Image (spheres, rainbow, N blue to C red):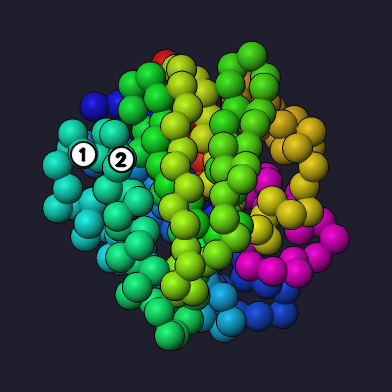
């Protein structure tokens, strides 16, 4: 089982007490996984409902199935149906393995991969914008090589929209040298510098080594 460090932070939209984002971390699972959701339309319960269902699916899944993550597509369609006719939510989940990261995305939450050579790229480029509950959610597969010390970021649109790729790259590179546990809060501070126009959530996961 891969050994990972996982940390997260979330903040509500400025002037609001409720947060429509939600996240789950399972660093001790086999394989370790993390997930984030962003509910839409005053739907603070939608994101939590999605994550509760996903946690159940993951707990019942065979570790071999999680390692290749084909259930991600099937689960995404099941989750889409579960919310149909009600509130909607994005869905983004990844499993961290020795040598690779695999996952699935529906909606406009983003996954990034930062490698030890300082490169940062978007893993969810091209993902459908349709959320769970729309009846049109298309599971976007995530597959990428992962080396020791590499960092995977999961971010809702409130967190990634205000930041340039270069600015985010600098934040991750600085945290890689020390203070990795503070990285999600540092990103949120930078993203909210001009105010929090939306709920914002960041999950940071690093393969130890």
Estimate how packed mark 2 is, as few (under 14), some (14 to 19) or many (20 or more) residues with alpha carbons within 10 Å. Answer: many
The residue that disc 1 covers is: 65
Q: Is residue 68 above or below residue 199?
A: above
Residue 164: quadrant of the picture? top right
Estimate how packed mark 1 is, as few (under 14), some (14 to 19) or many (20 or more) residues with alpha carbons within 10 Å. Answer: few
Q: What residue is drawn where x is 47% and y is 63%?
A: 137
Q: What residue is drawn where x is 76% and y is 58%?
A: 192
Q: Is residue 179 magenta?
A: yes
Q: What residue is drawn where x is 33% and y is 28%?
A: 97
Q: Is residue 140 above or below residue 108?
A: above
In this view, the residue in front, 170 or 94, is 94
Q: Is residue 66 above or below residue 162?
A: above
**Magenta part of the protein: which range?**
178-202
**Residue 130 in the image: x percent, y percent?**
55, 64
Residue 114: quadrant of the picture? top right
> Are the two marked residues, 1 and 2, in contact with CB atoms closer than 8 angstroms?
yes
| Image quadrant in which the C terminus is located | top left
Element marked by disc 1: helix
**Residue 62 in the image: x percent, y percent?**
14, 42
16 sits to left or right of 67: right
**Residue 156 in the image: x percent, y percent?**
60, 57
| Image quadrant in which the N terminus is located | top left
**Residue 19 in the image: x percent, y percent?**
55, 73
Q: Is residue 189 magenta?
A: yes
Q: What residue is drawn where x is 47% and y is 57%?
A: 138
133 sits to left or right of 26: right
Element marked by disc 2: loop
143 sits to left or right of 109: left
Q: What's the mark number on residue 12?
A: none
The residue that disc 2 covers is: 69
Q: Distance of mark 1 from mark 2, alpha carbons?
A: 6 Å
């Amino acid at each position: 089982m891969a050994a990972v460090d996982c940390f997260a932070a979330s903040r509500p939209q400025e002037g609001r007490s409720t947060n429509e984002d939600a996240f789950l971390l399972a660093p001790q699972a086999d394989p370790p996984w993390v997930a984030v959701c962003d509910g839409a339309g005053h739907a603070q319960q939608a994101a939590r409902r999605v994550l509760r269902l996903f946690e159940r699916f993951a707990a019942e899944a065979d570790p071999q199935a999680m390692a290749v993550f084909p259930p991600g597509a099937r689960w995404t369609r099941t989750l889409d149906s579960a919310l149909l006719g009600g509130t909607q939510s994005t869905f983004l989940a990844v499993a961290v393995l020795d040598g690779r990261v695999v996952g699935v995305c529906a909606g406009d939450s983003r996954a990034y991969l930062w490698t030890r050579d300082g490169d940062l790229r978007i893993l969810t480029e091209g993902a459908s914008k349709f959320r769970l509950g729309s009846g049109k959610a298309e599971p976007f597969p995530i597959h990428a090589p992962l080396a020791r010390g590499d960092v995977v970021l999961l971010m809702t649109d409130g967190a990634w929209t205000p930041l340039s790729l270069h600015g985010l790259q600098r934040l991750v590179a600085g945290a890689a040298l020390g203070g990795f546990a503070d990285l999600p809060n540092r990103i949120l501070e930078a993203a909210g510098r001009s105010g929090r126009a939306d709920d914002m959530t960041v999950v940071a996961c690093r393969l130890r080594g």
